[in-house]
Amino acid sequence: MNIVMVASECTPFFKTGGLADVIGSLPSALAERGHTLSVFLPKHASLPAELAEHATFLESFDVRVKWRKQYGGLYLYQKEEISYYFIDNEYYFNRPALYGENDDAERYAFFTHACLEAFDRLQLAIDILHCHDWQTGLLPAYLHQRRSGRLPKTVFTIHNLKYQGVFPLSVFDELLHFKESDRPQLEMNGAINFMKAALLYADWITTVSPSYAREILQHPFGEGLELILAQRQPMLSGILNGIDEKSYHPGRDQALYQTYTRQPARKQLNKVRLQQELGLPVLTEAPLFVMISRLVEEKGIPLLLAVVDQLLSSETMQLVILGEGDPLLADALQNVAARYPDSFRFIGEFNESLARRLYAGSDFLLMPSRFEPCGLSQLIALRYETVPIVRETGGLKDTIRPFNECSGEGNGFSFTHYRADDFLHTIRYAIHQYGRPEKWRQLQLTMYNSRLGWNQSAGAYEQLYNQLLSGEADTYDEESG
């Protein structure tokens, strides 16, 4: 198949979250199965210079954004078997922020129009057009509008339904190339909603875990779109994300103090060096917990703040949090750090190299999310032989099986209800098991055998694509995927 993916971010070029990791690894997994992969991205200012210099300029063209005629440049970066195409316009994309600008609607309307123009100019015979998140939500609608010629089948993946691309009604007349009769399909609650367009017009909708696909059919997980999603339920499925096991490999990761593979003693060396780097007391017997997350309410930061004093004042443990986001949450974590200088560290930034050392040097990862479409941190933690403690929601429920001390089964610890007492009890239970060498070894052995890569998920996408092209997608079985 000739598969084209369109997204707003992708490793190793630029990243704000898990979407970039998916677009950085899923195309490779599909290419390994013999398919032709092209990826279209904005040419953001944060494209590293060492990568940008290997991008070849192909051509420039005019891009119509309603009455505006804007410059569009097209660059190609070839990496092994994948073609990465970058849409260039310095006015729209030569900025530090990928999102959160006042003119995001115009920026990504331009990107959409430029992609459509580039498809035609490159004469791509696209079988599957796979769009990701609201920034690409208009593409299925525009293709549906064409109604003639050889049209690709469109797949739209929801990575996080909370972010929908909601803009003033004026955007419809000022930026979009739709007929007035199309307005109701884009309008919602007195605004234009890019994601709504994708949900109505895509041939198939996926989410990044089976549990999240079920959760979003109901309030509050549906974020106001649950009725539309229920309408499209026959064309909705969840396929778990994986991680790039070549990139996340503790046996080869140069960011670590000491590489290791299923070698607890060598992993312990990472713990000692991490404690030294962060100025924590070197306590090898005390469990070290980490949380690597954006500082937003949905990631469970308030739940952690509700229990942190009880934990640090009564348990022999250490806790490190890495992340940036809500200033109020950051201030609260700084206050905790001031109260517990010997057992708590807060690093208010995102640092990829340090994040990898935290995964490698810790015993437990905390993910008490209020909701989590898939989650990658728990998968990375398992890869680095660090035990996840999660709330049973979305992809966390699908990937982490709670440890059973009787049978020795399970690859982590989990709790069901979003309650501080349940979270506190689960952490204390995990600490108890950490102090029991035989049980801890059973947990490690189960964790080692967790399936984390893209092979199974890429196979599920391949099955879906084939069934769309054959007209049999209504028989797609997400559980087999």
Image (cartoon, rainbow, N blue to C red):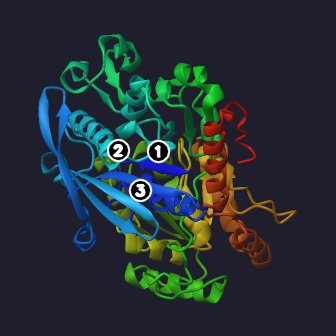
**Residue at 26% across, 25% down:** 176
Q: Going from the N terminus, do you reach mark 3 or mark 1 first?
A: 3
Disc 1: which residue:
126
Identity of the residue furthest to the top in this view: 181
Count the marks: 3
Q: CA distance from mark 2 to mark 1?
A: 9 Å
Q: Going from the N terminus, do you reach mark 2 or mark 1 first?
A: 2
Disc 2: which residue:
119
**Residue at 52% across, 28% down:** 222
Q: CA distance from mark 3 to mark 1?
A: 22 Å
The crowd level at tag 3 (other Cα within 10 Å; few <14, some 14-19, many 20+) is: some
Residue 314: image location, x then y, percent: 57, 64
Q: Amino acid at mark 3?
A: Ala
Q: Going from the N terminus, do you reach mark 2 or mark 3 first?
A: 3
Q: Give the mark toward the camera: 2 or 3.
A: 2
Whether residue 334 appears in this view of the structure is yes
Disc 3: which residue:
20
